[in-house]
Image (spheres, rainbow, N blue to C red):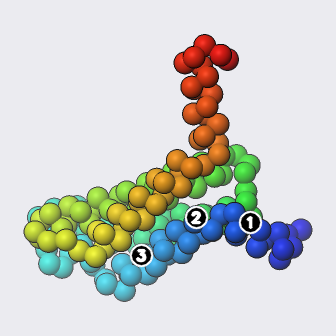
Amino acid sequence: MMTEERLMKNLDKNRAWFWTAIEMLGLAVYLVWRNQYFEVPPPQRTILGLLDDPVPLMMLVAFATFTIVVSLWNIKHLHATLIRTVFVWFSLFVYFGAFFVRDWDLHRVSIETIYTGVLLLRVVHEALRHPELRAVQKELAAHKQGVV
């Protein structure tokens, strides 16, 4: 059974991932509120309009919710932290790319591109600081030196 004390300890440990998930939820709410963000003004690439559809937005919400659950309960079974990292990185990378392409077509820089870019950089930074990744890096370095 999860106590409030344990939950707060997990939140302290995973606070960067928790707040990233909250920001992803905010991005999804913003895109719903803007209603067809990638359609007006019309960009040269109409494929970006697919990201305004309900399915990608619901996937963004699902990935953010999964990240919150993994962060609060500190789930480590079945590589949940790795899956969390990949989900967050993938969704932010897709939306950053879409915002970037839209800005390129419109010859401007939008706050959405800057926002998702900063989130993406923070996710990469947190992923590189992850203990599992550091253990793999040490193991590879030892293997290169011939110490297995």
The residue lying at 28 percent from left, 76 percent from top is: 111
The answer for how far apart the CA atoms under marks 1 and 3 are is 24 Å
> Can the viewer see residue 46 in this picture?
no
Residue at the limit of the structure toward the front, as seen here: 145
Q: Earlier in the sequence, mark 2 or mark 3?
A: 2
The image quadrant where one finds the C terminus is top right
Which amino acid type is marked by label 2? Answer: Trp
How many marks are shown on the rendered structure? 3
The residue that label 2 is drawn on is 17
Q: Are marks 2 and 3 in contact (CB under 8 Å)?
A: no
Please tell me whether residue 110 is drawn above or below residue 34 in the rendered image. above
Horizontal side, residue 25 vs residue 51: left or right: right
The residue that label 3 is drawn on is 27
The residue that label 1 is drawn on is 10
Which amino acid type is marked by label 3? Answer: Leu
Q: Look at the numbered disc 3 and give the secondary structure of its residue.
A: helix
Q: Are marks 1 and 3 in contact (CB under 8 Å)?
A: no
Q: Earlier in the sequence, mark 1 or mark 3?
A: 1
Query: Mark 1 packing: few (<14 Cα in 10 Å), some, or many (20+)?
Result: some
Residue 42 is situated, as x and y percent measured from the top left of the image, at 13, 74
The residue lying at 57 percent from left, 33 percent from top is: 137
The answer for how far apart the CA atoms under marks 2 and 3 are is 15 Å
> Can the viewer see residue 82 in this picture?
yes
Residue 127 is situated, as x and y percent measured from the top left of the image, at 53, 51
Residue at the limit of the structure toward the top, as seen here: 146
The residue lying at 82 percent from left, 69 percent from top is: 6
Q: Look at the numbered disc 2 and give the secondary structure of its residue.
A: helix
Residue 66 is situated, as x and y percent measured from the top left of the image, at 61, 64
